[in-house]
Amino acid sequence: MLLRPTGIRHRQALILDALSKIGPTSQRHLAKQFDVSAGSMSSMTERLVALGFITQSTNPVNRRSDILDLTPDGRAVLEKVLIVWQEAAALINLALGDNQAETLTALSTKLRNTLGGTQPEKEQRGA
């Protein structure tokens, strides 16, 4: 709901954020980072391409795969997303207090890691 003014959903915002951190990458690698099928990632990125937030081009090294990258408009909308996320963090701190907010963050990170979640990583080319 907080992201509504940006025109994208949370999962799409996560894709933009991942691309900003890892740089241009294959759709297959991004799907692996999010632990979703290539088809699911294709569906998620399709709208971002249509909105002009990411580009999808043929991989010059492996012509059977695509490379995804942020556009200037994608970077601009990501800046708005990051502000929304900062505002949400401030609301959490206000509601819980600093100590409990830190505990919530630590527990959420532990839960993510326990369930197999990770931070997006750069693609290992040639691996």
Image (spheres, rainbow, N blue to C red):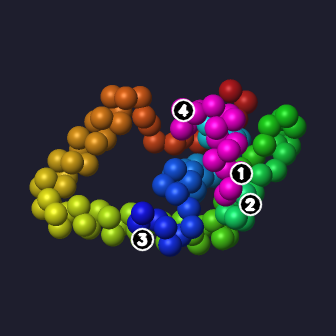
Q: Is 89 situated left or right of 17 in this image? A: left
Spatial CA span between label 4 and label 2: 23 Å
* Residue at screen point 69% across, 35% down: 39
Tell me if residue 107 comes above or below residue 46 in the rendering.
above
Asked whether 116 falls inside the magenta stretch, the response is: no
Real-space CA distance between mark 2 and mark 3, rounded to the nearest whole angstrom:
23 Å
- Residue 50: which disc? 2
Q: Between disc 3 and disc 1, whose residue precedes?
A: 1
Tags 2 and 1 in contact by the CB under 8 Å rule?
yes
Q: Is residue 9 left or right of residue 39?
A: left
Q: Position of residue 103 (x, y in %)?
A: 17, 47
Q: Residues within 10 Å of mark 2 (few under 14, many from 20)?
A: few
Which secondary structure class fits the magenta region best? Answer: helix
Counting residues from the start of the chain, the first of labels 4 and 3 encountered is 4
Q: What type is the residue that disc 3 sits on?
A: Ile
Picture quadrant of residue 26: top right
| Residue bounds of the magenta highlight | 32-48
Sequence order check: which comes first, mark 1 or mark 4? 4
Q: Real-space Cα distance between discs 1 and 4?
A: 18 Å
Q: Are marks 1 and 4 in contact (CB under 8 Å)?
A: no
Q: Can residue 124 be seen from the camera position used here?
A: no
Q: Which residue is mark 3?
A: 83
Secondary structure at badge 4 equals: loop
Tag 2 and tag 3, C-beta contact below 8 Å: no
